[in-house]
Amino acid sequence: MKVVLQNLTKIFPSRNKKTPEEQVVAVNDFTFEIPDGKLVGLLGPSGCGKSTTLYMICGLQKPTGGSIFFGEDDVTHLEPEHRGVGLVFQNYALYPHMTVKQNILFPLQNMKKELMKEVDERREAMAAEQLAAFNAANGIEDAAADAAKVPVEVAAAAENVAAEGITAENAAEVTVAKPPVFRPKLPARQKMLKELMLDRAYMAARLVQIDNLMDRKPSELSGGQQQRVAIARALVKMPRVLLLDEPLSNLDARLRLQTREEIRRIQRETGITTVFVTHDQEEAMSISDLIVVMKLGVVQQTGKPQDIYDNPANLFVAKFLGTPPINVFDGEVKNGALYVGEDCLMKLPGIADQPVHVGIRPEGFVLDKNGPLHMELVNVEVMGRDMSVISKNAAAQTPTVRSIIDSDLRSEIGGETVSFSIKPNKIFVFHKETEERLY
Amino acid sequence: MEGSKHSWKAWLYLLPVIILTLVFTVWPIINTIRIAFLKDYSMIGAMGGKTYEFGFANFSKVVTYKRFTTCLKNTVLLCVLTVPISTMLALLIAVCLNAIKPLQRLLQTIFFLPYVTNSIAIGMVFAAMFNMIGKPSSPDSVGIINNFLGIFGVAPINWINVGSEYWANLTVMVIYIVWNALPFKILVLLGGLQGVNKQYYEAAKVDGTSRVRTFWRITVPMLSPMLAYVLITGFIGGFKEYSSVVGVFGENMGPAGQKGALNTMVGFIYDSLSQNNQGRASAAALILFGIILVVTMINLYVSKKKVHY
């Protein structure tokens, strides 16, 4: 199911009527299309409106303006229960008084009517099968014609039982007097409904691998298990869209790694369009098909994780993505060349002379004795595969600059200064005021 | 342990309370049990040095009194009727109060007013409201309830006056006790409701849960500790019902001419005491204690299975 957000806006009015200008624009003119079956991460610092966006997609919050489409359906004014969404809350919101099984069954019990239709379809199919077998056994020729009349036959069969009132005495008489009557043998509707719901619940539980915990209470589960139960509860009703609010924030670091892979796997297996909210860029980058970076209610950039990382639209996005974070310097464009302090880093034709922000990814530094960028060496942190060279530069906006270098080059570092050349695809230049990307 | 060296200090601080409890709570309980088993005990006789035979005479006497069975019936009826009704009403009001924002504080205060009002005074007001007999000189003294029912063409009902029927008396008592019991229950349940995480309701909403189902499957279980508390204290209070009857019917404990028709267990104990029959009073008190104990145990047993903490 494709999800389309059109000019979505959410304004929380000011609490004080006298100062309406204090209203909070939580989401401002958000337009985005989430393709069918993709996993999309809404990423941004706290207060950027990502959760509000999620809740608007869910329906728990009503947008101030704009509209939301699920496929071709306009769901903007639909109540959440009619949207067919599954929501996983940040703290899971599992009903503490119910077992895992009851928790997962809960949404199903709300849709008994729809499920009953499925039960009836199954019953009809079963009846048709039995009728075919019956006809074959009794040598009735026009089985195909009869099979088409199955629903009528089923009803008629039920009437026959009541009307005939077969007893031990007249049983022989009845069978002699009439040709054999077809009576489908079907389990009770309620029983089938129950079984169907249990099947669905166990299917969802197996998908998230908690089918061995079904009789526990949520309080008897670990955080990761609770998380899975919450996902199972959201999935069991087969939602059109799955929404996850900070799904990993309550887990410890190891579980987080594991669970995010799980979420990815579950999403791939089910193919349900999924939107999740996170403030952790690593999380978003690692599992999303697409990410949306937000700041103060305004979308900064949307796209594939790698594209956004490689081509940040502005300084905020560049700073927000990547660990360790990008290093930012005060720089200047002079006569078509980029300067950081006294060092001329590269030629930069076509950009007017102006002061700029210069961002260099940690992996963009290359040790080079003749390199243009000169830094004061502070420390070297060895991390095995590679090492962090921590250095200082008067033009840097942070006290220290962190660069990541292959650890084989350990011996090349020494003395009080270190020089780098810069990989051209790892350096970005931003406008001093607007912070928009210039290069 | 280090603290045990100084534990005499702790005992010293506790001493006043311990002494007071021993003298005014523990000893009276022991004495009540003792007196209950002494035949024909009277305090005056005991002070004169008389000794009494040990036995169950008091109990067998009390149980065979017709007055006692009336009191027991009244008490149980009032309990069984008022506790469920008041709890359900309180739950309803608490849920409604919790759902509204404006005026919530004000309404909360209004609902709490009966709690801080003297029950005898309220009883007298109820008696006036349910009054039927108007003096020829001032027909206005017919109670507001009968006047109100008159609007719908209902003939005045004799609620509490001379010759009134038992069901009418009981109805008035039930209304009065329910009304009087509401504030505390609303307060406790509202407090419980405000502690329920809103996300459970949001989760239920996203799953398309109907309001009725949300109430029974989420609100009630979430409130179950408070409900259990309210029910247990409600039953204990119900079995001790006394002042409400005094408030409405006066010391007569029944409409004029039917003395004691609405008397309760506690009323029976008071009567026995005022007739200087401490043995009978003690035996009745022990029976009441036994009933409350059993009911509370049943309550606790049920709540262990049903209450989610």
Image (cartoon, helix red, strand yellow):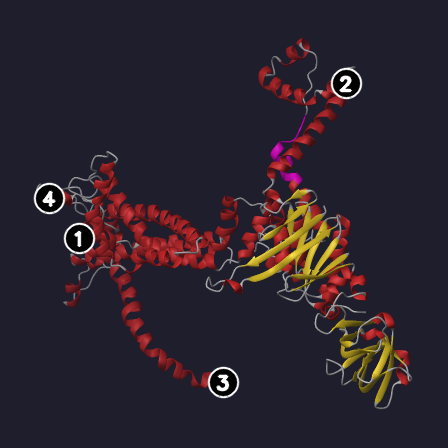
Q: Nearer the viewer, mark 2 or mark 3?
A: 2
Residue indicated by mark 2: A143
Same subunit, labels 2 and 1: the answer reads: no
Indicate the secondary structure of the residue bearing disc 2. Answer: helix
Residue A231 percent coordinates (x, y): 67, 53
At label 4, which amino acid type do we have? Ser
Can residue A342 be seen in this snapshot?
Answer: yes
Tell me where the magenta segment starts and ends, as one range. A185-196
- Residue positioned 39% across, 83% down in the render: B8
Decide: few, some or many residues near mark 4? Use Cα within 10 Å; few <14, some 14-19, many ≥20.
few
> Callout 2: few (<14), some (14-19), or many (20+) C-alpha neighbours within 10 Å?
some
Frontmost residue, B300 versus B177 = B177
Prevailing secondary structure of the magenta residues? helix
Which of pointers 2 and 4 indicates the residue nearer the eye?
A: 4
Asked if marks 3 and 1 touch (Cβ < 8 Å), the reply is: no
| Residue A199 placement (x, y as % from top left) | 68, 42
Q: What residue does disc 4 label?
A: B138
The quarter of the displayed image where residue A427 is located = bottom right
